[in-house]
Image: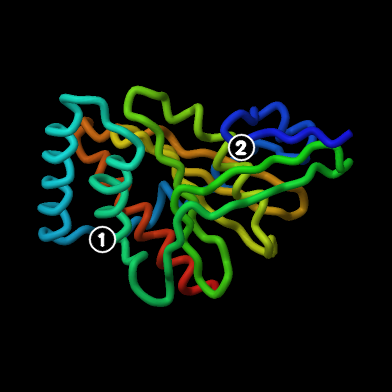
């Protein structure tokens, strides 16, 4: 009998056991968040200051998922160029993956999906601000595994509005993934680093595809 699991309830252990996912700690596998990051312009830094100020105001109350997307994620995607060609954005996209033995199906909806020529290039799962971003990592990885065309690497981001973790998944020779360090909005320069990484992803994907 096939077991169906909601994506928000999946664990890393289940992904490793049933879908062959392997975490890799080799820094050469995921250098995109660490090296050759683009410089930011003064206007971009000023926009990020407004994002920080908006979050500080919103954080006085519980910051719900949709508020995180509107106030934090959307400005970052705009500054990184993901709202312009060759990219386009879809939200609440349904996905499904089936384990190699056919016994488990994982279903869910992606918060924000950025595509380029039918490639899934960035998945964002925003969580309520009081939740650790770590709880969203298995969920985002399950969505990334559902990519229709798995020929190349893809990237993910989990954020609760104040904390950010980037992910990379590559299918060959096995399905490997790695994560970045955790960035915190309140830390000096961390939000700038988040934007630099997003701009780096956009540039790499534009060149490779």
Q: Residue at x 70, y 26 (%)?
A: 13
Tags 1 and 2 touching, CB below 8 Å? no
Q: Rounded to the nearest whole Å, what is the CA distance between mark 1 and mark 2?
A: 29 Å
From the image, tell me which residue sits under label 1: 79
Nearer to us: label 1 or label 2 = 2
Is residue 187 shown left or right of residue 21? left
Q: Is residue 22 shown above or below 143?
A: above
> Circle 1 sits in a helix, a strand or a loop, which is it?
helix
Question: Where's residue 93, x and y in %?
Answer: 53, 55
**Dot 2: within a 10 Å radius of its alpha carbon, few (fewer than 14), some, or many (20 or more) residues?**
many
Q: Which quarter shows the C terminus?
A: bottom right
Provide residue 117's location: percent of width, then percent of height.
54, 75
Mark 1 or mark 2: name the one nearer the start of the chain: 2
Q: Which residue is mark 2?
A: 7
Q: Residue placed at 31% from the left, 48% from the top?
A: 73
Mark 1 neighbour class, 10 Å CA radius: few under 14, some 14 to 19, many 20 or more: some
């Amino acid at each position: 009998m096939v077991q169906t699991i909601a994506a928000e309830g999946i664990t890393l252990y289940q992904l490793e056991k049933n879908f062959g996912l392997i975490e890799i700690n080799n820094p050469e596998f995921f250098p995109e968040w660490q090296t050759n990051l683009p410089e930011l312009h003064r206007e971009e830094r000023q926009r990020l200051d407004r994002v920080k100020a908006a979050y500080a105001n919103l954080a006085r109350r519980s910051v719900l998922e949709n508020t995180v997307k509107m106030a934090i994620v959307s400005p970052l995607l705009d500054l990184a160029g993901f709202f312009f060609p060759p990219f386009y954005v879809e939200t609440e996209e349904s996905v499904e993956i089936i384990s190699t033995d056919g016994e488990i199906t994982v279903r869910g909806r992606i918060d924000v999906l950025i595509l380029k020529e039918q490639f899934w290039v960035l998945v964002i799962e925003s969580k309520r601000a009081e939740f650790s971003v770590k709880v969203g990592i298995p969920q985002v990885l399950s969505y990334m595994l559902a990519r229709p065309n798995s020929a190349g690497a893809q990237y993910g981001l989990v954020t609760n509005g104040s904390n950010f973790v980037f992910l990379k998944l590559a299918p060959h020779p096995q399905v490997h993934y790695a994560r970045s360090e955790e960035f915190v909005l309140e830390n000096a320069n961390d939000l700038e680093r988040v934007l630099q990484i997003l701009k780096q992803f956009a540039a790499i994907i534009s060149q490779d595809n």
